[in-house]
Image: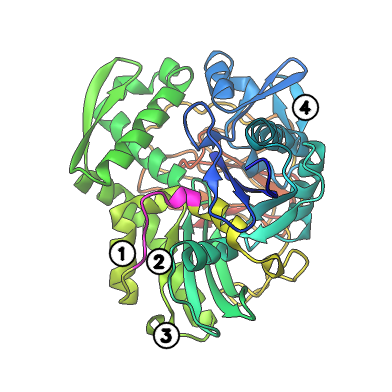
Amino acid sequence: MTDKRIELGIDFGTSHTIAMLGSEGGPGRPLIFEGSPLLPSAVFADGSELIVGRAALQQGRRRPAALEPHPKRWIDADAMLLGGREVAVPDAIAAVLGRVRAEAKRVAGVPVSVTVTVPATWGPTRRLVITDAAERAGLGAVRLLPEPVAAAAYFLHRLGHRIGEGQTVVVYDLGAGTFDATVVERRDGGFTVLAQDGRDDLGGLDIDAAIADHLRLQHPDEAGEDGQGRHRQELQEEIRLAKESLSTYSHAAVTLPASNRESHLTRGELDDLARPLLAPTVKVTRAVIAAAGLLPAATAGVFLVGGASRMPLVATMLHQALGLAPTAIDHPELVVAEGSLAAPPDDEHAADPMPPAASGTPPVEPAPRMDYRPSPLPPPSPSRRCRSTPTAGRCLRIPGSRGPRVRQRRACPCRSSSPRCSWRCRPCRSCRCGVARSRPGSRWARCTCTAGISCSAVPT
């Protein structure tokens, strides 16, 4: 491969980053990091050095405050606080991209062209953060490609699905931290986004959090302080492995790290926990198809991408709602990275305005968030009901709810993990309200209104 034109495609994800090497339009092969194509996107601050990947997760068990496992969630902030050190968000992302560049150079030499995929909903501000990070990582000028376009190119050029000129496909992308549904049309040999929508606060991590809450209800002693700190990553890894196992088998074992006991999770239990979280994704998908002026039967197919889409329940719910059997593959987390190599250069659309969302309102660039590092939350209390309420003015602390520990401004809202909780925090697009989750994907979140305009808690 070293004698050919080396191309590098990077899918920078919430939990993992995947990179593919290709040459002259040929099939790509994934870069391998410590025996896996999945490089954890985690960043750990060790003095003046930023450690990434599995080494960052290992170091984070010793010093959780210096670890950020999901730097992509800070895309709207200027900096994050890691172990008392303020780290610029482009620098944190550059550390991950730099690791990819170093491995690609070691394996195949310096790549001639680099493509980085981004969500179709991202506007110029977020895209600029990625291009800035790529330059700091030594990748130079990179091509930005919408993720659904890369996915459609993969299914067309790599799997050989027939997508004729003028035909449309639906890309259902359920990642670790976000969900996107997009309708793309094949036009002039490439793909154009017709309609898109998604959820920035919904992904596989939410399902992991629901499983963790379920296990804590069964084993209350696992919710101690030690389980919230040093053993949290171990429990998250156990849950991830159990989810993958339940894609094939009817039950899976989960080792509880705090007590070293073994619990079990069945596919039925997983479906019951995941169904209410997946229902909004199906609703968004139907709305996106309608926004494109199509009926589900008029599309060339529904393609499932993103690691969390591997759950059999995803395909089942979509099939029931749309009347179409979605197309799934064994490794959906690799689709976008390899598709970025297959997409023609015309498909980048890096400077094109985003199409209207299915809700009918154009996407709005979120306002910058305050830079603060979330601290660990106490163990959930299933019996405590949420008593937070949104206001038209500034966020208030309602008597009876425990206020979160946040640096700088006052904060409100929903700390309850009870399924009965009727409020959920979301990013507020009308003020400088930022959302940070101490345990990503948890039902309880924390919002901080830095402008004092409105509370971002909304009913679910």
Query: Pointer 3 and pointer 1: residues touching (CB < 8 Å)?
Result: no
Residue 200 falls in which quadrant of the image?
Answer: bottom right
Q: Which residue is mark 3?
A: 298
Lower position in the chain sequence, tag 4 or tag 3: 4
Q: CA distance from mark 3 to mark 1?
A: 19 Å
Q: Residues within 10 Å of mark 4 (few under 14, many from 20)?
A: some
Which residue is the extreme one toward the left? 250
In percent of width and height, residue 343 lies at: 61, 64
Q: CA distance from mark 2 to mark 1?
A: 7 Å
Q: Nearer the viewer, residue 382 or 206?
A: 206
Q: Which residues are magenta?
A: 326-334
Looking at the image, which residue is at 66% across and 30% down? 106
Q: CA distance from mark 4 to mark 3?
A: 51 Å
Q: Which numbered circle lies on residue 282?
A: 2
Quarter holding the N terminus is top right
Q: CA distance from mark 3 to mark 2?
A: 18 Å
Residue 58 in view here: yes
Query: Pointer 1 and pointer 4: residues touching (CB < 8 Å)?
Result: no
Q: Name the main secondary structure of what is drawn in magenta.
A: loop
Q: Looking at numbered disc 4 in the image, what kind of residue is underneath it?
A: Glu
In percent of width and height, residue 309 lies at: 40, 54
Residue 389 in view here: no
Q: Looking at numbered disc 3 in the image, what kind of residue is underneath it?
A: Ala
Q: Which numbered circle lies on residue 57?
A: none
Looking at the image, which residue is at 36% across and 59% down? 328
Q: Nearer the viewer, residue 31 or 382?
A: 31
Front position among marks 3 and 1? 3
Q: Residues within 10 Å of mark 2 (few under 14, many from 20)?
A: many
The number of numbered badges drawn on the structure is: 4
Q: Which residue is mark 1?
A: 317
Q: Which residue is mark 4?
A: 86
Q: Residues within 10 Å of mark 3 (few under 14, many from 20)?
A: few
